[in-house]
């Protein structure tokens, strides 16, 4: 089989979780994505909410087995020499649908071909094939080096845990529960001065409530600096749990901008400016506090956007007063306060 060589690499990726406006939950998943010709392969599959089999939150034995499988050291899991490239982020059931491809060796090279959407053991390439994707021929040395390197990176796995510091215990408890439901660990405290450095290294982010003074925030930062821990700091915009979850999800996303689909959100004068790097579904949700500090949530946009910048008009009632906008794609979350 002839095919031009493509570059092969791997990079951390995220399936954004969160608490949605209707009360539903989406599970947060960290995984390793395939970078083909310096671009995430997932971005070539339009609006697909899926993760690769190289998920960071599965036991090491399962992760290792997936790597060995892609190296073709074990038999293909599906008939026809087919492998799952992207699957359901909520479960491992093929019935939910998965992107599969045939993987084969040609001398020292690895070839990925015949991409398809598959819901049972047999793929129908005529009906469900991704005819514009592949085949990809990868240099064997580059391919093997990238995959084998994952087996020694357990210590570099994402720190999916956040430290919550605030005065409103009830809000913090609800926030911690929501984060745990979607797969992000959370602890509540008010003082970290006596916390051992090894424990501080477990956190990827620290979220401050609005009542925490600048002096208290500075003391927390000094504690993490002394421990040599680089964490993201989140200044809570308002005591609204879904909004705070979105802020924390964004803070935990350390990927370069070029590896994200949703890259920009600005809000002002009743409009939202959104930028995406490839076609994807984007949801905009507005949250606001009324004069009695009651929370109101409204989905103000849900649609597929083409790559580029877009201006979206927002419902004036949804963004009056103290309000905020959350933008979500399958792999990114952005949050902005509504400017007046």
Image (spheres, helix red, strand yellow):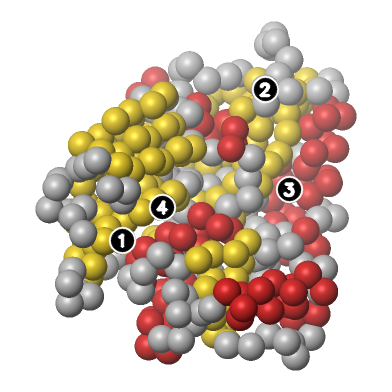
Residue contact at pointers 4 and 1, CB within 8 angstroms: no
Which of 139/238 is in front? 238
**Image depth: mark 2 or mark 3 in front:** 2
Residue 20's disc number: 1
Q: Secondary structure at mark 1?
A: loop
**Image depth: mark 4 or mark 2 in front:** 4
Identify the residue at horizontal 75%, vertical 56% (top origin).
64
Compared across the picture, whether 7 is left or right of 245 comes to right
Crowding around mark 1 (Cα neighbors within 10 Å: few <14, some 14 to 19, many 20+) is: some
Residue 252's disc number: none
Pointer 4: what residue? 335
**Could you tell me residue 35's position as x and y percent?**
66, 32
Compared across the picture, whether 112 is left or right of 336 comes to right
Residue 67's disc number: 3
Crowding around mark 4 (Cα neighbors within 10 Å: few <14, some 14 to 19, many 20+) is: many
Q: Tell me where residue 251 sits by quadrant.
A: bottom right
Compared across the picture, whether 207 is left or right of 110 comes to left
Identify the residue at horizontal 59%, vertical 71% (top origin).
206
Pointer 2: what residue? 37
Q: How many marks?
A: 4
C-alpha distance separating marks 2 and 3: 20 Å
User: Which mark is first along the chain, 1 or 4?
Assistant: 1
Residue contact at pointers 4 and 3, CB within 8 angstroms: no
Residue contact at pointers 4 and 2, CB within 8 angstroms: no
C-alpha distance separating marks 4 and 1: 14 Å
User: Which mark is first along the chain, 3 or 2?
Assistant: 2
C-alpha distance separating marks 4 and 3: 35 Å
C-alpha distance separating marks 2 and 1: 34 Å
Residue contact at pointers 1 and 3, CB within 8 angstroms: no
Q: Is residue 101 visible?
A: no
């Amino acid at each position: 089989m002839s095919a031009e060589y493509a570059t092969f690499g791997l990079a951390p990726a995220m399936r954004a979780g969160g608490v949605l406006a209707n009360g539903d939950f989406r599970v947060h998943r960290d995984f390793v994505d395939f970078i083909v010709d310096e671009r995430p392969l997932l971005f070539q599959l339009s609006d697909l909410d899926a993760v690769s089999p190289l998920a960071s939150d599965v036991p090491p034995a399962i992760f290792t087995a997936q790597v060995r499988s892609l190296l073709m050291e074990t038999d293909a899991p599906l008939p026809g020499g087919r492998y799952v490239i992207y699957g359901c982020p909520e479960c491992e059931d093929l019935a939910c649908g998965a992107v599969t491809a045939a993987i084969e060796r040609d001398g020292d090279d690895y070839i990925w071909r015949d991409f398809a959407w598959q819901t049972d053991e047999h793929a129908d390439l005529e009906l469900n094939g991704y005819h514009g994707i592949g085949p990809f021929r990868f240099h064997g040395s580059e391919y093997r080096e990238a995959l084998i390197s994952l087996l020694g990176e357990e210590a570099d796995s994402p720190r999916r845990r956040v430290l919550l510091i605030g005065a409103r215990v009830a809000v913090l408890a609800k926030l911690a529960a929501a984060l745990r439901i979607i797969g992000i660990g959370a602890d509540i405290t008010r003082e970290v001065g006596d916390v051992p450095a090894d424990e501080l290294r477990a956190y990827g982010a620290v979220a401050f409530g609005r009542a925490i003074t600048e002096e208290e925030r500075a003391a927390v930062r000094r504690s993490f600096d002394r421990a040599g821990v680089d964490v993201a700091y989140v200044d809570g915009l308002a005591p609204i749990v879904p909004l705070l979850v979105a802020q924390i999800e964004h803070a935990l996303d350390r990927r370069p901008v070029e590896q994200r689909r949703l890259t920009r959100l600005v809000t002002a004068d009743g409009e939202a400016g959104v930028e995406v790097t490839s076609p994807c579904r984007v949801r905009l949700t507005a949250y606001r506090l009324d004069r009695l500090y009651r929370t109101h949530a409204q989905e103000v946009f849900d649609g597929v956007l083409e790559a580029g910048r877009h201006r979206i008009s927002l419902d004036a009632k949804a963004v009056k007063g103290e309000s905020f906008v959350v933008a979500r794609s399958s792999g990114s979350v952005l949050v902005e306060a509504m400017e007046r």
